[in-house]
Amino acid sequence: MSSPIIDKFARLTALKPARAKAAGAAAVAPVRSATSSLPDGAAQLAEILEARALENHHGEHLSVKKWFSEAIGHAAPDGTVDAEVMHLLSPGAHETAGDPSQWLFLDTETTGLTGGTGTYPFMVGIAWWDAGGLEVEQFFMRDHSEEHALLVTLAERIAERGVLVTFNGKSFDWPLLETRYRMTRKIKVPTLTAHLDFLHPARNLWRIRLGSVRLAELEKHVLGFHRGADIIGAMIPQFYFDYLRGGAVEPIVEIFKHNQTDLRGLAGLASKILSLLAEPEKHSGDPLELFGVSRICERRGETVRARKHYAQSIERELPAEADRFARRALARMARRAGDVERARELWESMVGNSREGFEAYEQLAIYHERVTGQLREAAALVKRALAELRRSKGAGLLSAAMHRQYKERFEHRLARLEKKSAKTLLDGIEARS
């Protein structure tokens, strides 16, 4: 098996322009044509894609433009996005972020999946709403030497539409591009007006139901679109390295199609999420989607909406784990709002052998000790909780550390309650004597 380090450097070597062979060197299959410094398949690739070369003062790169009558599953948002929805999506974002005509969807295809200074975005796909549909433009490095030219063109497009829209772009695509801009030492990093990343709301809305929130899975299960045969993402870097060495161009064509579908899926998903955040009762019959909207509202401090949607999601019968989470969140917010009776009702519906159930035992004990003064009831709840803890030990419901913490807290509370009860009893006897 080859060393991972050796393999990494072999891939990086493929990005460098080929050098002429010394006289007398062994004959090998050429990776460059006699008339061009580009890989052998570059001309064929441009012909298949009906692409053109864009030129600027840093050189050339390949460009492909294609218009789609719609994104996957959803059309463009109708008018400006409501300010409350934008707050849920990206609090503090520039007001321009609410104007979909200023959005620039972006997705990259790279020479590695982990980022770092040795990773190159050999393809950058962008898209924007135009003429009732989605205009897609893709920039491609036919050779590593075209990177600077590609980056200049991308900067020009960002200057036209400064609201970047991505799927995991805040963690991967944009930091990678920033790194590439800085490493040129010549091209300034473009200034974004705002950056909307739809991965994070997608996780809140669909991870519990789907497990995976890969874009292709969301297209299938949320937007109702099945890609069919699609290129394997992990193979994309290798297909590009093969192309640089003079390999087949057909896999590169498939990468272009894959990137186009990603952009269309991202645009459709963005519209879907915006409609859910605006009117979840109207646009969703799924209690887990309502639950997801509730979590987003809670995290943004929109407690009135959060309480409303948590209650609605519970009424629509959530799965057990999500139901417990929703009840706990509702109970906590009710308690903070001073609605102790509502909090009590929710805690009582949760007691049991679960993480939320032990919290419910603790909160009910506090309620009876501090609000009703029923010390015996509080002590009985603590004893039940300790019995549940003994039964749950080793079952994996709680981590060992959390199990120990709850046990210590319940034992301490029980000792205090018993001492307090004894004192109350003694005081009563003294008062009667």
Image (cartoon, rainbow, N blue to C red):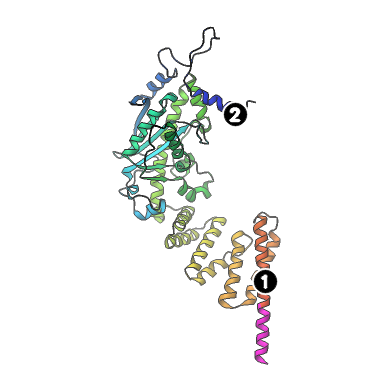
Mark 2 and mark 1: Cα distance apart in space = 59 Å
Q: Does the magenta stretch include residue 235?
A: no
Name the residue type under label 1.
Answer: Leu
Which residue extends farthest front?
A: 185
Where is the C terminus found, in terms of image quarters?
A: bottom right
Which residue is depicted at the point 34% across and 54% down?
A: 83
Q: Is the magenta stretch mostly helix, strand or loop?
A: helix
Where is the N terminus found, in terms of image quarters?
A: top right
Q: What is the x, y in percent for residue 404? A: 68, 60
Give the labeled residue for mark 2: 5
Of 90 and 207, the residue lying toward us: 90
Which residue extends farthest top?
A: 24
Q: Is residue 431 magenta?
A: yes
Q: What is the x, y in percent for residue 290? A: 46, 55
Of 370 and 386, the residue lying toward us: 370
Q: What is the x, y in percent for residue 352? A: 62, 63
Q: What is the x, y in percent for residue 146? A: 40, 25
Q: Is mark 2 on a helix, strand or loop?
A: helix
- Disc 2 crowd rating (10 Å Cα; few below 14, some 14-19, many 20+) is few
Name the residue type under label 2.
Answer: Ile
Quadrant in which residue 63 is drawn:
top left
Given this view, does label 2 or label 1 mark the residue nearer the observer? 2
Which badge, 2 or 1, comes first in the chain's sequence? 2
Which residue is depicted at the point 65% across and 66% down?
A: 409
- Disc 1 crowd rating (10 Å Cα; few below 14, some 14-19, many 20+) is many
Give the labeled residue for mark 1: 414
Q: Which range is magenta? A: 420-433
Q: What element carries label 1?
A: helix
